[in-house]
Amino acid sequence: MLFKKLTYGITLLLLMGCRTNNEQATASAIEQLNLVNLEDKKQYLEKIFEDDQKVRGSHGQEIMLKFGKDSEEHRNYVQIQIDQDALNLKKVEQYLAQYGHPKESELGEIATITPWAVIHHANSYEERERNFVHLYRAYLQGDLDDGAISMFLGRMYQMQFGERFEMESPFKSEDEINALIEKLDLVDKKRKAQETM
């Protein structure tokens, strides 16, 4: 019992230490990236993905079950996740602004899915909307599959309207994606993504 409490305490301290490091990294993330080659880009994106996943998973659930949803330990864990998500978003947006969306044929699956994963975890609808063009263009170019873009748009719909998007079956993924784009008033952004390919 004491060992478990000690383990949770040490983990929280480590995560809080990451929070301080993340705040320092946020300042440097605003600077121009200097990723010279494909390997640099791959490593940069894969590290962001690793950081994104590190603050997720069963650990948060364990803290909630152990200490309760309204506990200080759980609130600290959630805040660490929020801070990490904000930092990751800044890094990904900077990468997209400088280099565009990664191509799977050049950087592999993990690096290519990183922008989607990070933007999908963004805290606000506005953050998702402003990055839609990048993700939709990646979908059109085959670097993001229809399940990922559909899930992304479905979550935006849920954030905007407070309910899940329902569509009468049968339908194709493309039909659902187009319907969601129309419902979310993203038609102009869709057109922009198509024009800038």
Image (spheres, grey):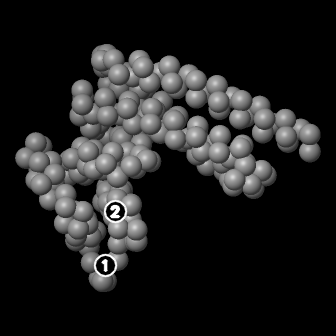
**Percent position of residue 108, x then y:** 37, 38
Q: CA distance from mark 1 to mark 2?
A: 17 Å
Q: Residues within 10 Å of mark 1 (few under 14, many from 20)?
A: few
Q: Evaluate whether residue 151 shows in this view.
A: no
Q: Earlier in the sequence, mark 1 or mark 2?
A: 2
Q: Please, is residue 180 above or below residue 122 in the view? A: below
Q: Residues within 10 Å of mark 2 (few under 14, many from 20)?
A: some
Mark 2 residue type: Gln
Quadrant in the picture for residue 69: bottom right
Report the residue at 78% width, 35% height from top.
9
Q: Nearer the viewer, residue 10 or 82?
A: 82
Q: Please, is residue 152 above or below residue 158 in the view? A: above
Mark 1 residue type: Met
The C terminus, quarter of image: top left
Q: Evaluate whether residue 158 shows in this view.
A: yes
Q: Secondary structure at mark 2?
A: helix
The N terminus, quarter of image: top right
Q: Which disc number belongs to residue 160?
A: 2
Report the residue at 72% width, 43% height from top.
73
- Could you tell whether 95 is left or right of 109 in the image? left
Q: Nearer the viewer, residue 100 or 69?
A: 69
- Could you tell whether 111 is left or right of 171 in the image? right
Q: Secondary structure at mark 1?
A: loop
Reading the image, the residue beneath label 1 is 167
**Percent position of residue 23, x then y:** 51, 24
Q: Please, is residue 20 above or below residue 188 in the view? A: above
**Percent position of residue 138, x then y:** 24, 46
